[in-house]
Amino acid sequence: MTRFAEWCTQAEIPVTVHKLQVLHANPKKQAEAVAIVAEAVPDHYVMPDRLAQLLTRLGRSAVAAYVNEKLPTALPIKSGDLGEILCTTFVYESTPFRLGIKRLRWKDHRNMAMRGDDVLAFSLDGGTGLNVLKAEAKSRAKMPASVIAEARKALSAYGELPSPHAMSFIADRLDGASDKPLRDALDDAQLKRSLKPSQVTHMLFTFTGNDPSTLLTNNLNAYKGGAAQHYVGLRVENHQDFIKAVFAGAGG
């Protein structure tokens, strides 16, 4: 995980109904932050069992080469992927939604962006059943309002629900015995059309060099739909250098 509390200050900004958090990376802890995030990156691209098999059969050098071939080399793709990784780890560390997959493991090509919902995470509650977090992650050195609006549009698509393709994509990749309850719940949501906006939380996660507070506040206050909203702005002032350092530390 990326242990945001160890290298960021965190503040909650008052909004009318929903939730808005802003995290600001401490410039004095940059080296620590890069090391923490770089260590977490490979797990989002490769299966641990696959690495263990390579390590046993071919040794550490083969593992390093395999991981390196998975990591993107184009800076725009690194930026987008890291935004998604940071969003995913924030969800797992700071929300009740801890079930799902790390979808970057199924990229078609390391320098291509994936389509569909950026992050889907789930919780299963005996009383309310399936609850879903649908997230859009945006990474820019300087975040414009147009990109926030684009993310808002994606979150509200499909009647506020996750896209059918994204739900099926995840269900098809849940093949362990422990995954069966979530897979069955996703199948029911898809095939019985039982999922409602009241069971969905939207997260708009920005990873930026500038302060996104005003843009996120304005966009969140304008939302009129029926899903709960949780916006998160992560500010790393030297955004581009941070991305390069993280992937260099991860092996790419």
Image (cartoon, helix red, strand yellow):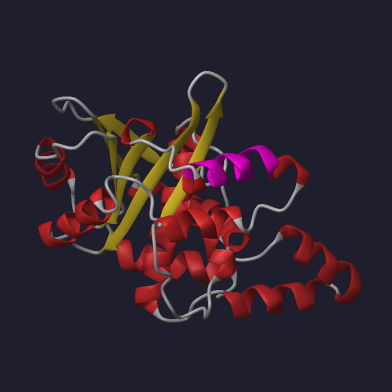
Which residue lies at the image location 34% right of the left edge and 55% below the top edge? 137
Which residue lies at the image location 41% right of the left edge and 38% below the top edge? 195
Above/below status of 16 relative to 155:
above
Residue lying farthest to the right in this orientation: 57
Above/below status of 25 relative to 39:
above
Q: Position of residue 246 (x, y in %)?
A: 48, 64
Quarter occupied by the C terminus = bottom right
Number of numbered labels in the structure image: 0
Q: Nearer the viewer, residue 117 or 160?
A: 160
Position of 223 with respect to 172 (left or right) is left
Image quarter of residue 18:
top left
Q: Tell me which segment is drawn in magenta.
A: 180-189
* Residue 94 visible, this orientation: yes
* Residue 24 visible, this orientation: no
Which residue lies at the image location 19% right of the left edge and 60% below the top edge? 150
Residue lying farthest to the top in this orientation: 127
Which residue lies at the image location 54% right of the left edge and 41% below the top edge? 188
Q: Position of residue 236 (x, y in %)?
A: 31, 53
Q: Nearer the viewer, residue 103 or 181?
A: 181
Please identify the dominant SS of the magenta region.
Answer: helix
Q: Residue 235 colored magenta? A: no
Above/below status of 52 relative to 24:
below
Q: Residue 187 colored magenta? A: yes
Q: Nearer the viewer, residue 86 or 5?
A: 86
Q: Position of residue 75 (x, y in %)?
A: 38, 77
Q: Position of residue 229 (x, y in %)?
A: 27, 35
